Image: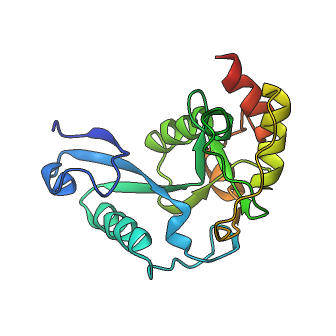
Amino acid sequence: MRPGSLVVHSIPPDGPPGLIEALGEGPARIVYISSTAVYGEASLVDESTPVDGRTERAAVRLAVERSVAAGPWSSLILRAAAIYGPGRGVQESLQRGACRVDDSFVSRIHVDDLAEHVEAGLLSQVRGAFPVADEEPCTSREITEFCARLLDVPVPVSSQAKARATRRVDGAAIRRELGITLRYPSYRVGIPAALER
């Protein structure tokens, strides 16, 4: 890697081993896309919420975060809420008949808005770890009903499986730090735009 490189690390922890070590000392800056899974069972999340590594999913994400933060470069960790956009999200799972319907809250971020966070983060000197989400958490039932109306399909029956943990994520702090205005502040504008593409 050339000295002074800017690196986006978006490979999940189950990817090839040794990725951080392979970077050597070339990067000047790394932005790592992590997950809000690192907050465990926290139901309200913002930049001050402590992490909880008791689950395996959270523990492996936190291990990568620590490796990124300990490197000889400046770093920013973006803990993304559920990512959706063209080809990905409730609007797609609903059409495949694989949609979960319950009253647990989920926060989301449109892939284009996440990309803007990444680009702005690479070109900034902001450090630390921040949650990234849009401005309208909602239940899986609300978003499924919204998508069903858009697609003119029936709403699936409620899931019998145990409901997921409810999590409302406030991503305002990193938006302020990076000077970002969301293109899709809500699934109500993001999902129709995704379907148009």
Image x and y of residue 124, in percent: 49, 44
The quadrant of the rendering that contains the C terminus is: top right
The quadrant of the rendering that contains the N terminus is: top left
Image x and y of residue 184, in percent: 73, 35
**Residue extending farthest top:** 197
Residue nearest the observer in this picture, 96 or 3: 96
Q: Is residue 1 above or below residue 37?
A: above
Image x and y of residue 14, in percent: 28, 56
Image x and y of residue 125, in percent: 47, 50
Residue nearest the observer in this picture, 101 or 30: 101
Q: Is residue 45 above or below residue 13?
A: below
Query: Residue visible at 64% across and 45% down?
Result: 109
Query: Residue visible at 71% across and 69% down?
Result: 166
Q: How is the image coloured?
A: rainbow
**Seen in the image, is 37 located left or right of residue 25?**
right
Residue nearest the observer in this picture, 62 or 96: 96
Q: Is residue 15 above or below residue 4?
A: below
**Seen in the image, is 23 located left or right of residue 122?**
left
